[in-house]
């Protein structure tokens, strides 16, 4: 996966904000896997992945509906933002073990 920037986390959190709370963690993990697959595809072919784009989390997120970006005074948005960060940590820890 390409390096993660603030905009990537924000885009993913905005996708989660539109999703039912019970499905958010699965959706977040799915977006991370899609970004990883796209990055591998780009590395192998030199072309964007037809569904998931350039290997960034933002592109994987933008294949879905994003909520308008709220401020950090929105507790739901903060929870979604935090979930993306937690999933990223888990993704990187798991990846290092493999």
Image: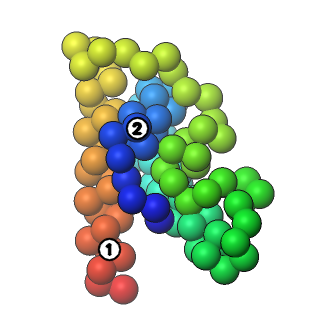
Q: Quadrant for residue 34, please give it.
A: bottom right
Secondary element at tag 1 = helix
Secondary element at tag 2 = helix
Residue 28 spot, x, y in % from top left = 45, 47
Q: Residue furthest right?
A: 50
The residue carrying pointer 2 sits among few (fewer than 14), some (14 to 19) or many (20 or more) residues within 10 Å by Cα, namely few
The image quadrant where one finds the C terminus is: bottom left
- Residue at the spot 46% in from the left edge and 61% down from the top edge: 2
Is 79 drawn above or below residue 72 in the view shown? below
- Label 2 vs label 1: CA separation? 23 Å
Is 36 drawn above or below residue 95 in the view shown? above
Q: In the rendered structure, find residue 70 and report the number of the disc placed on it.
A: none
The residue carrying pointer 1 sits among few (fewer than 14), some (14 to 19) or many (20 or more) residues within 10 Å by Cα, namely few
- Residue at the spot 50% in from the left edge and 33% down from the top edge: 15
Residue 8 spot, x, y in % from top left = 42, 43
- Residue at the spot 66% in from the left edge and 54% down from the top edge: 53
Q: Which residue is mark 2?
A: 7
Numbered marks: total: 2
| Viewer-closest of 48 and 11 | 48
Residue 33 spot, x, y in % from top left = 52, 62
Q: Left of 66 or right of it: where is 47?
A: right
Q: Which residue is mark 1?
A: 94
């Amino acid at each position: 996966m390409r390096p993660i920037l603030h905009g990537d986390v924000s885009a993913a959190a905005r996708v989660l904000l539109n999703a039912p709370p019970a499905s958010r963690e699965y959706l977040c993990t799915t977006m991370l896997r899609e970004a990883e697959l796209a990055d591998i595809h780009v590395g192998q072919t030199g072309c964007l992945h037809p569904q998931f784009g350039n290997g960034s989390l933002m592109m994987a997120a933008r294949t879905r509906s994003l909520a308008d970006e709220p401020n950090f005074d929105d507790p739901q948005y903060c929870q979604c933002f935090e979930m993306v960060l937690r999933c990223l940590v888990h993704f990187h820890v798991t990846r290092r073990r493999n």
